[in-house]
Amino acid sequence: MNKLIDLAKILRSKNSGPFEITLDILFDNPEYYNRVVKSGVINVETICQLYNLEPKDISNIIFFEKAFGIKITYNRTVSSGTFRDRDVYGAQQHAPLMDIVIP
């Protein structure tokens, strides 16, 4: 078993407009990408647990086989740049993904 941080080349987050965050998981190895996808660990339930979200808050989880990438988009609890926003650019939201264990 490995953690996702050990398999992915890039884990990053960013705004997807002022009301959403996008998480990108990118691989440079098709074997690692396929292993993560086949594990089924990247799903709505996992993302809800990691980010304290409800399933309705997740807009998309998209698997891009040709690019060896996974894109997850979820609704922000507070819009970017407003009162109580802790990360205006959404650039520091990928950390919870690092410790996901991949069988």
Image: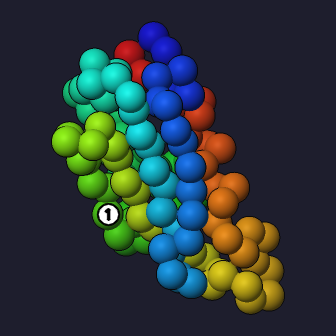
Q: Amino acid at mark 1?
A: Asn
Quadrant location, the C terminus = top left
Residue at image coords 31%, 29%: 33
Identify the residue at the far top of this view: 1
Q: Is residue 49 above or below residue 89?
A: above
Identify the residue at the far bottom of this view: 82
Image color mode: rainbow
Q: Position of residue 71 (x, y in %)?
A: 37, 54
Q: Looking at the image, which is closer to me, 92 or 52?
A: 92
- At mark 1, the secondary structure is strand
Q: Does residue 39 show up?
A: no
Q: Is residue 24 above or below residue 28?
A: below
Q: Looking at the image, which is closer to me, 78 or 24?
A: 24
The residue pinned by badge 1 equals 60
Q: Position of residue 75 (x, y in %)?
A: 49, 74
Q: Does residue 22 show up?
A: yes
Q: Quadrant of residue 37?
A: top left
Residue at image coords 27%, 24%: 30
Residue at image coords 49%, 55%: 23
84 horizontally vs 33: left or right: right
Q: Residues within 10 Å of mark 1 (few under 14, many from 20)?
A: some
89 horizontally vs 68: left or right: right
